[in-house]
Image (cartoon, rainbow, N blue to C red):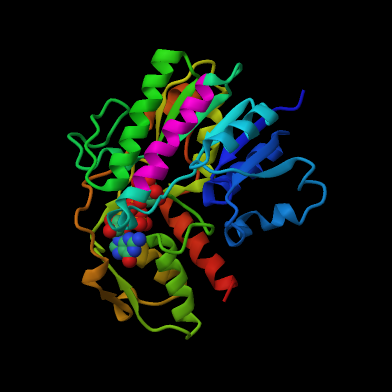
């Protein structure tokens, strides 16, 4: 029988890579889309355009986390074997501007989904895409699945709430529910307001002579950056394991925003120092410290290892931007 998977957030970066992976594995893929999401669907455009895929093996349904009844109906009708929950307001900086929307969607939306699963006669295996932001200012570095949560922004608080509830529902109702604690993961499909894409895009646009300056916030900030394609493989592996658990997905290597600048501008033979300006308006009220993950558990239990290096990632992103100039 064909395996069916359901994805919330299918139009996002991770949703599009995960859809490709699942289709390649022979799955029938279903995704929830909001009625307003026409433009965001561009990451799936190549799949819509394929008549052998769209409405044959890939199906989109109008459903939303703030409308649980519709979502419940869709899930009952499809009966997926796996559910990947990727949707949410994912911009940390923006979560300071719209904390209530962030918590409503990311925290309460996940709880609503767990409540629906709890009532289904045969609940699907559930993957929750959570974030290193749950650690905020962590007590230890690198972090493991046992590092206490200490979020320092509304987004991290919403993710911490949802992460803990996934644990509670797993323990209390026996749901097959996984928290994937994902560190930053990027690609040419990354949203334009995240720092890697912003930099790679600017490097290409400046090279093409259509922009001169790039405004950034804190360029000394450090993150553990990997490739999104590697991280969606981790999601899938986590749901194939016989039991459910929490896993860190990370490269274990820290780089600064300045390292991104150096790699991206080097890829187009330019010096970033000639073009970058600091904008205090882009500084965040609080920055996490030393967010770097120890993925040994995913490596030993799931046989997951990230393939792309930081340098390869930034180069791929910058060259992709050059092509679209
Ligand atoms: N976005 C942005 N724009 N970030 C900037 C800028 C800028 O102009 N200048 C400096 N930064 C710094 C931010 O302050 C932050 O320290 C770092 O660059 C990375 O910012 P983002 O790319 O926006 O990602 P993030 O780390 O805040 O959040 C991402 O990763 C999380 C996992 O750790 C998002 O994908 C989250 O959804 C995800 O959970």
- At a point 72% along the width and 43% down the height, the residue shown is 58
Establish if 119 lies above or below 278.
above
Q: Is residue 59 above or below residue 246?
A: below
Query: In front here: 183 or 173?
Result: 173
Q: Position of residue 46 (x, y in %)?
A: 70, 56
Is residue 61 visible from the viewing direction of this image? yes
Nearest to the observer: residue 15 or residue 321:
15
Query: Magenta stretch containing residue 107, yes or no?
Result: yes
Left or right relative to 4: residue 281: left
Residue 11 located left or right of residue 295: right
Residue that sits furthest to the right in the current view = 52
Where is ligand 1, by quadrant?
Answer: bottom left
Above-or-below relation of 204 to 158: below
Give residue 179's position: percent from left, percent from top: 42, 30
Residue 292 lies in the magenta stretch: no
Residue 294 seen: no
The part of the chain drawn in magenta is 102-118
Say which residue appears at 63% left-offset and 32% top-offset: 73
């Amino acid at each position: 029988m064909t395996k069916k998977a359901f994805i919330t957030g299918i139009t996002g970066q991770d949703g599009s890579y995960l859809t490709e992976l699942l289709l390649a594995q022979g799955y029938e893929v279903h995704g929830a889309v909001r009625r307003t999401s026409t433009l965001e669907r561009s990451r799936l455009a190549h799949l819509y355009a394929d008549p052998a895929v769209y409405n044959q093996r890939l199906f989109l349904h109008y459903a939303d986390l703030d409308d649980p009844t519709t979502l419940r109906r869709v899930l009952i009708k499809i009966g997926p074997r796996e559910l990947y929950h990727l949707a949410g307001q994912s911009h940390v900086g923006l979560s300071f501007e719209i904390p209530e929307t962030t918590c409503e969607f990311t925290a309460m939306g996940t709880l609503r989904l767990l409540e629906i699963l709890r009532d289904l006669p045969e609940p699907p295996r559930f993957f929750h895409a959570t974030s290193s932001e749950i650690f905020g200012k962590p007590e230890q570095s690198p972090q493991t699945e046992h590092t206490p949560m200490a979020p320092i922004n509304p987004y991290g608080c919403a993710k911490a709430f949802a992460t803990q509830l996934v644990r509670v529902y797993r323990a209390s109702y026996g749901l097959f529910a996984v928290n994937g604690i994902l560190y930053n993961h990027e690609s040419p499909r990354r949203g334009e307001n995240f720092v890697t894409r912003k930099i790679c895009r600017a490097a290409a646009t400046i090279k093409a002579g259509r922009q001169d300056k790039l405004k950034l916030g804190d360029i000394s900030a450090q993150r553990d950056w990997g490739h999104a394609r590697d991280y969606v493989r981790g999601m899938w592996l986590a749901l194939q394991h016989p039991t459910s658990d929490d896993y860190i997905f990370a490269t274990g290597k820290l780089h600064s925003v300045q390292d991104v600048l150096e790699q991206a501008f080097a890829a187009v033979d330019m010096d970033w120092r000639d073009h970058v300006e600091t904008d205090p308006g882009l500084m965040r009220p609080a920055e996490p410290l030393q967010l770097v993950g120890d993925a040994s558990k995913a490596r030993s239990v799931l046989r997951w290892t990230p393939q792309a290096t930081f340098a390869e990632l930034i180069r791929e992103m910058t060259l992709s931007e050059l092509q679209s100039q």
